[in-house]
Amino acid sequence: MGTIYLVRHGQASFGSANYDQLSELGFEQVRLLGQWFANTRQGFHRVVMGGMQRHRQSADTCLAELPKALLHDTEWRTDTDFAEFDHLQVLQRHCPEFGDTEAFKRLLAQSPQPQLAFRNLFEQAMQRWMSGAHEDDYVESWPQFRQRCVAALERVAAQADAAQGAAGDNAPSQASIVFTSGGVIAALTQHLLGLPDQQVVTLNWSLANGAVTRLRHTPGQISLSSLNNYAHLEWLGEAGAITYI
């Protein structure tokens, strides 16, 4: 039986000109995860990144904490099917003001709770995207996004199962790690558990930066083992180490 670790990237640079860049705290979050893996002697046979800068930064920073022996002969590759959906487009189709960063900041500033106001807007934008009533407004529809995420996961599992079979029954179980984003992990969790679309919106907000979702797999079957584990941030971290954007 193989294991796949889905890692949500560290905190990105929300509110800056380049969101796709880890913040100082984001680097620390994935560094703590790497120390957790090192302490538990968890090595990996393959590393997969979703193709975004924050995915690569998270992978490099996290795995730099592991002894080289734990990454011996590890395959590194990029699979853009693990990339996040275009959250900027999803927001702009629902709230055109988001296209003007300063105007959007002023809009949020009018609320006594700007973060809550943003969350409400984002959830409404997600519901519009997922409703299926406006698919022509988006480069990628919700079903297309979900389908590519599932296909990417199945490729990782199939590759690991094939490698396990070639290595023989006495070989160590295959361990893969995927650095991706919250929307991808939420969509895959929905697929594995059969959740309704509305639960994906809620789940997406509960996934912490640097958190790990663990899957187990055998040929033709993938199951959820644990979801959104951020014990490494509580164990090694400080107050404020757990974030969700």
Image (tube, grey):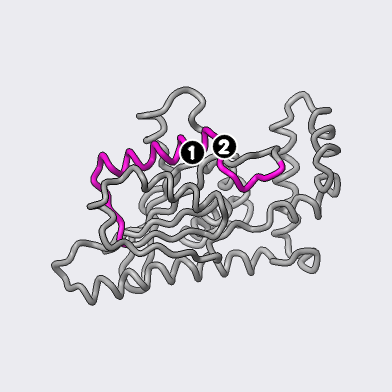
Report x, y in % for residue 129.
73, 58
Report x, y in % for residue 34.
36, 42
The residue positioned 36% from the left and 52% from the top of the image is: 225
Based on the displayed image, in which of its 4 quarters is residue 206 positioned?
top right
The residue positioned 59% from the left and 52% from the top of the image is: 200
The residue positioned 52% from the left and 57% from the top of the image is: 190
The residue positioned 26% from the left and 51% from the top of the image is: 68
Report x, y in % for residue 76.
40, 62
Which numbered marker is on residue 192? none
Q: Is residue 200 magenta?
A: no
Circle 2 is placed at which residue position? 23
Q: Are marks 1 and 2 in contact (CB under 8 Å)?
A: yes
Whether residue 15 sits left or right of residue 210 in the image: it is right
Report x, y in % for residue 79.
50, 66
Any part of residue 178 in sight: yes
Q: Quadrant of the N terminus?
A: bottom left
User: What segment is highlighted magenta in the picture?
Assistant: 17-45
Compared with 38, 237 (above or below) is above
Q: Quadrant of the C terminus?
A: top right
Whether residue 223 sits left or right of residue 18 in the image: it is left
Measured in 3D between alpha carbons, the distance from the residue under mark 1 to the one under mark 2, in whole angstroms, is: 6 Å
Which numbered marker is on residue 27? 1
Any part of residue 133 in sight: no
Q: Secondary structure at mark 2?
A: loop
